[in-house]
Every structure is written in C-alpha cells, then in structure tokens.
C-alpha cells in the first residue's frame, strides 16, 4: 500500500489531531505543515520528527505548501474563521480535505466549501467526532432499534465549565472570528440532534444573552503576553476571573428551538459558566425516553424508560453503560482521523457528512441571528439536490 502524503494547516492546538494517532499500519506520512506562527511550526516539526524519524517541511503560507508538496490529503485544523478560505483553496487543487467543525462561520461559507468539493471532485470529510463517541453511538443504536418508538422530541442541555478558560480569552469571544458559540460548540450538538432524529432543521428561533463575561476585566488591546487558554479548575467562581479577550460580543447563554423537516421538535441550551462540564441529551419517542448522564469524558450511563409507572424515577427500566475509547475525545479522534485516511483510499463511509455539517452551521447561524433579533423564527434554506445527495467521501 502506497503511503499517503499528508499536510496540516494550523499545526498547534487541534493541529495535533493529524499526527497523534499514526501507527505503521496506517501507511501515512506527515510531509508538511503550514501555520502563521514560526514558533509553532518549529514545535510541529520537532513533534512529528520524534514520531516518524524525519521532520516535515514547514510553511508560513499554506498556499506555498499546496503548490510545492504533492499531497494526497490535508487536515485543516486552523481557527474557524480560516476554514472557508483554506478549505476552498485546497479543494480547488483536487486535494482531499479533513475540515474541523464548524465547517465555516457563515452559511454562505459552508455552501461555498461544498460547491468547491463538488466542482473539483475533491474528497471532503468533516470533523464531527461526536458521531464516533460511544455514548452517542449507543443512543443512536437505541433510537434506530425502535426502543423508544418514533422519535418526536430531542432536548440537549450543554454545560461548559471551561467556557471562561477556552472561549472568552481569545478569538472565540469575537463575532468577527467565531460568529456565535452556537457554531464553535453548538455545531456538534445540533449535528448530533440531526443525526439522532434522522432529519435536518427547517425552522429555528432562539433567545440568549451575554450574562457574565462582558462584566469581567479584559486584557488590553496591545498586550504582548501569549494568551493561556488551557482548562483550569481553579478558575472559579466565574465573577472573580480576569484577563479576558479585549472584544467580547458572543453570547455565553444561548437557547434555540428547532423544528426538523420530519416533524421532530428539538431544543439546545448552552451555558459557559457552569461548575461542571457535560452534554445531557434526552430523546422522547412514542414508546419511551432515553437520557445520558455523563458523556465521552468519564463514560456515560444511558437510562431507558419504556414503561409507565408514574412519578420521578432516577433510573430507567433499562440502564446501559458506555466507556470512553483510547485516544482524544473518548476515542472519537483516532476513529474520525482513520475515516479520513480510508476515504482518501476510496474505502469506507465516514459517520459525518459535509451536508450535515452545513445544516448544523446553517441552524447555528440562523439561531444566532434569531437571538440577536429578539427571537424571530428563521427558515433554514435547503441545499440544491446535486449537493444534498453528493457522496463527498468518494
Ligand atoms: N472536533 C473537536 O473536538 C475540536 C476540538 C478543538 C478544536 N476544534 C476545532 O479545531 C480548530 C482549531 O482550534 P484550536 O483551538 O486549535 O485553534 P487555535 O487558535 O489554537 O489555532 C490552531 C493553530 O492554527 C494556527 N493558525 C491560526 N491562524 C492561522 C492561519 N490563518 N493559517 C494557518 N494556521 C493558523 C495557530 O497558530 C495554531 O497553531 C477550530 O476550528 C476548532 O473549532 C475541534
């Protein structure tokens, strides 16, 4: 088997994804990386050299990397606001792309990426790794088995205790770069809701606010010290923290309602100043309800209530336990990376799709528009048929 020649755009932070899980059986060589930070490129080259023996080439301009290296595939793991420009450029060169979520920070940007992949027949795999998390897979299997009858409602509460560490200290806090945290964080959950329901949102509205972080001390615009965005459990309570991003205009509390094309009614609630971290889904069908306690981090308990006994019961009529797998995000990171390599070789079908990534971003963007316009409902435009049905992994 010929080794795949792989490049990475955005080599720090999430950029470790492409080179972290490689084994000799993968037959993959990381040949190059591009990053706007020379320091980060050096760290990337040393990191990959330690694993594969020789260092990859480093580029400050990703376009030069695409022109000079004969790449089979590229991981785009740069910040959200870079995705559209970089993914379109790589796809237009006929090179396969693994693109992190959110696919883009606007619906038009997402549609442009799909158009580029379609037009140039380039493979495109989206980084919705939640579709490989064991608790999500178990909930999907329960739904698909008919255990709760026909799904009618899905509600997700998302508690993000590290909001003040990771999302209000850098570009994530600024609408120009993130649009809304309904994309950066919520794109995952809106996608999971769509997957569990077997349909996409056609109408969305929302309410929300910036409840906490706009009241806290910020770094000055010209501060030179690097921003520390690592999770820190000592950052508590939220109102006593400081050193936040100079610009903060994304909401830290968002609630959206979704009506899906197949009639499922859904809601997603996100808070960035909780003491704990968890995604909690409940799915209600015509014959029962399931709910997860805990998620990919320490594993989850999924309760299934499918008999009417009345009153509150913490435990269901059946209980299922899921454990995290090996590797980042409960084992979902190595799994989704391998789905990209398989797609480049013309094998397998990834759990995630570019169409689903586009609908989750479209819903998040219009949900944010609704929050910012007093809760007005918006219709989510459908993709044209040729994009809706295109197999982007082939
Ligand atoms: N699926 C997941 O579980 C998951 C987890 C974390 C992050 N992400 C996604 O990964 C992406 C990167 O997130 P992050 O937190 O690592 O971001 P980051 O701000 O840490 O940046 C990642 C890297 O990109 C580089 N970079 C910045 N601008 C660039 C540009 N114009 N061109 C090339 N490189 C550039 C940075 O120097 C850095 O090395 C985001 O889209 C984020 O949503 C996904």
Image: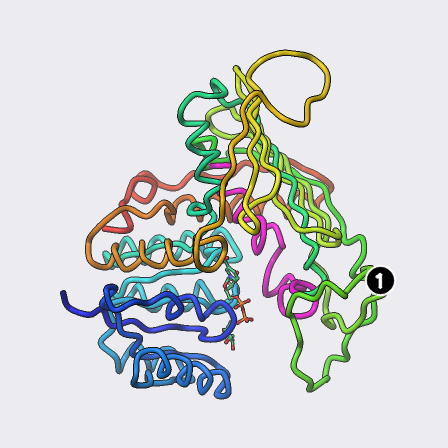
Taking the image as shown, residue 262 lies to the left or right of residue 186, namely left
Number of callouts: 1
Q: Is residue 191 magenta?
A: yes
- Residue density around tag 1, few if under 14, some if 14–19, many if 20 or more, within 10 Å: few
- Which quadrant of the figure has residue 77? bottom left
- Which quadrant of the figure has residue 164? bottom right
- Which quadrant of the figure has residue 314? top right
Where does the image place residue 69, in percent across and percent down from the top left?
25, 79
Taking the image as shown, residue 328 lies to the left or right of residue 252, namely left
Which range is magenta?
Answer: 166-194
Where does the image place residue 122, in percent across and percent down from the top left?
26, 59
Q: Nearer the viewer, residue 305 or 382?
A: 305
Where does the image place residue 125, in percent across and percent down from the top left?
35, 55
Question: Quick one: SS at disc 1?
Answer: helix
Q: Nearer the viewer, residue 62 or 192?
A: 192
Q: What residue is pinned by disc 1? A: 215
Task: State the residue lying farthest toward the left.
Answer: 1
Predominant SS along the magenta part: helix
Taking the image as shown, residue 193 lies to the left or right of residue 166, namely left
Q: Please report the residue visible at 72 percent of the width from the left and 84 percent of the height from the top.
A: 222
């Amino acid at each position: 088997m010929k080794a795949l020649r792989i490049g990475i755009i955005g080599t720090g932070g999430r950029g470790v994804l492409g080179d972290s899980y490689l084994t000799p059986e993968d037959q993959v060589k990381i040949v190059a990386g591009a990053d706007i930070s020379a320091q980060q490129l050096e760290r990337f080259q040393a990191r990959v050299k330690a694993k594969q023996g020789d260092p990859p080439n480093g580029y400050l301009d990703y376009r030069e990397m695409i022109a000079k290296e004969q790449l089979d595939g590229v991981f785009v793991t740069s910040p959200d606001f870079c995705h559209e420009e970089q993914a379109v450029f790589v796809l237009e060169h006929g090179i396969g792309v693994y693109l992190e979520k959110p696919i883009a920070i606007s619906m038009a940007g997402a549609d442009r990426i799909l158009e580029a992949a379609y037009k140039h027949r380039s493979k495109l795999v989206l980084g919705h790794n939640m579709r490989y998390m064991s608790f999500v897979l178990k909930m999907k299997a329960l739904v698909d088995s008919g255990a709760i009858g026909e799904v009618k409602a899905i509600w997700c509460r998302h508690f993000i205790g590290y909001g003040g560490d990771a999302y209000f200290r850098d570009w994530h806090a600024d609408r120009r770069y993130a649009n809304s945290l309904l994309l950066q964080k919520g794109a995952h959950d809106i996608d999971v809701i769509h997957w569990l329901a077997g349909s996409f949102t056609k109408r969305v509205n929302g309410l929300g606010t910036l409840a906490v972080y706009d009241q806290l001390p910020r770094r000055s615009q010209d501060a030179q010290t690097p921003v520390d965005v690592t999770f820190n459990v000592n950052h508590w309570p939220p109102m006593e923290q400081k050193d936040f991003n100079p610009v903060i205009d994304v909401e830290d509390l968002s609630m959206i309602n979704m009506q899906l094309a197949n009639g499922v009614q859904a809601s997603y609630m996100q808070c960035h100043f909780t003491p704990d971290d968890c995604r909690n889904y409940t799915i209600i069908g015509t014959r029962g309800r399931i709910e997860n306690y805990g998620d990919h981090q320490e594993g989850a308990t999924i309760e299934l209530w499918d008999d009417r006994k009345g009153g509150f019961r913490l435990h269901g009529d059946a209980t299922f336990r899921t454990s995290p797998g090996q590797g980042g995000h409960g084992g979902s990171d190595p799994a989704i990376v391998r789905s990209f390599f398989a797609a480049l070789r013309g094998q397998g079908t990834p759990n995630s799709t570019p169409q689903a990534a586009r609908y989750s971003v479209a819903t998040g963007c219009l949900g944010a528009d609704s929050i910012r316009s007093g809760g007005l409902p918006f219709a989510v435009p459908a993709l044209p048929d040729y994009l809706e049905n295109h197999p982007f992994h082939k």
